[in-house]
Image (cartoon, rainbow, N blue to C red):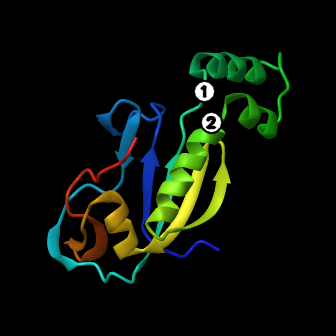
Amino acid sequence: MIPKALTLLLLLSTLSPFVTQLQPHVYYVGPQLLGQKIGPLNPLTPITVVAFIPPKNYQQLYLEAQMIGNGQLNLSKYQLFQKFGDAEKAEEVTNYLKSFGLTVQYVTPVMVIAYGTAKSVERAFDVGLYLYNLSGEIYYAPAETPPFIPQ
């Protein structure tokens, strides 16, 4: 079970128009720094990290997705993962997260989900996590946007 915590989405693709580009094909999606900073987040707070891995051969994937939508092709999710997923990159992400003490809970060739303490997430992404107050609502977010996301 994934702990109820902030989810940092590490989009390693160009699939979302709502992200800020950091490096080629590496993006951060998360809360923007709004509100008044209250103070640092307790280092023992559980945090969930989700890393999306870009598909291989994106143009072919797009074409086949259209064909599936039009009923011209029938592929299972497993077949799509095998054909377009990047298991090697998923393993790199998994090893990176584990090296900072995060527990990897779910891995596919297109996504890695891990969790750990705020302290381990801060070390892995070279960022401080702080509490903020926005119109009476308390939330936490990286103090520096964007956090460091390794290639």
Residue neighbourhood size for the residue with mark 1, other residues' Cα within 10 Å, grouped as few (<14), some (14–19), many (≥20): some
Q: Earlier in the sequence, mark 1 or mark 2?
A: 1
Q: In which quarter of the image is residue 77?
A: top right
The residue tagged 2 is 86
At 56% from the left edge and 41% from the top edge, which residue is drawn? 89
Q: Element at badge 2?
A: loop
Image coordinates for residue 2, horizontal then vertical, percent:
59, 71
- Distance of mark 1 from mark 2, alpha carbons? 6 Å
Q: Residue 56 carries which label?
A: 1
Number of residue marks? 2
Foreground: 113 or 75? 113
- Amino acid carrying label 2: it is Asp
Looking at the image, residue 33 sits to the left or right of residue 149; the answer is left
Foreground: 45 or 37? 45
Screen quadrant of the C terminus: top left
- Amino acid carrying label 1: it is Lys
Disc 1 to disc 2: CB gap under 8 Å: yes
At 20% from the left edge and 63% from the top edge, which residue is drawn? 143
Residue neighbourhood size for the residue with mark 2, other residues' Cα within 10 Å, grouped as few (<14), some (14–19), many (≥20): some
Q: Element at badge 1?
A: loop
Looking at the image, residue 108 sits to the left or right of residue 119; the answer is right
At 35% from the left edge and 75% from the top edge, which residue is drawn? 119
Looking at the image, residue 106 sits to the left or right of residue 44; the answer is right
